[in-house]
Amino acid sequence: MSDRVVPQPSPDRLVPFAGHPLVVGVTPGQPELVLLTACAWASALGVSVYGAYVDPARSVVEELPDGRVRHVEVDPDVVDDSWRAREAELAALVARVADAAGVASEFRYLAGRADRALTHLARAVDASAFVVGAHRGGRRARDVLDESLTLRLAHHQHRPVLTVPLAVVDWRGRLPWQ
């Protein structure tokens, strides 16, 4: 058994919002609402945004001090350079939306598990908070909870997580997982 004490959220670990960027999770096909929300918050706070995509099909080789990572295919027998086009597409999206909002931005293409990768980036850039999109319905409740990036971030690091709703449930109708 380890005597290691895991640092807990507390006032002394709070990163001030002013002067510290936001990390926003972006994915291909995701509604721009997530990025627009992050840019609106960043504009109100006078800070920049770091758009980040985490590719689960790639593995981290090295984490760099600026939040970037060196990465390779999870399967060394597969050569797939499609990630380069995805990186260019998402970087252009982040730049376009941030520019339109008058917010400075950078993009990072990350690899591995999303909560760990985003946490590494947030530490590296001294971010004050995360902005991520909520799951859209259509799955069983247990699956959504097991896969929730918002929950994993909230349970494994100390920065606040702003979740942007992408679909709402009509409380009078059937639930998506029914």
Image (spheres, rainbow, N blue to C red):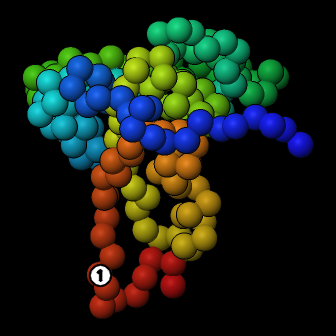
Whether residue 77 appears in this view of the structure is: yes
Residue occupying image coordinates x 34% and y 41%? 131
Question: Residue under circle 1?
Answer: 170
Residue 100 position, x and y percent, is 11, 26
Whether residue 98 appears in this view of the structure is: no
Residue occupying image coordinates x 45% and y 26%? 122
| Mark 1 surroundings within 10 Å by alpha-carbon count, few (fewer than 14), some (14 through 19), many (20 or more) | few
Residue 94 position, x and y percent, is 28, 26
- The answer to which of 58 and 40 lies nearer the viewer is 40
Is 53 on the left-hand or right-hand side of 81?
left
Secondary structure at numbered mark 1: loop
Look at label 1 and name its amino acid: Asp
Residue occupying image coordinates x 33% and y 76%? 169
Residue 12 position, x and y percent, is 42, 32
Quarter of the figure that contains the N terminus? top right
Residue 96 position, x and y percent, is 20, 24
Is 12 on the left-hand or right-hand side of 168?
right
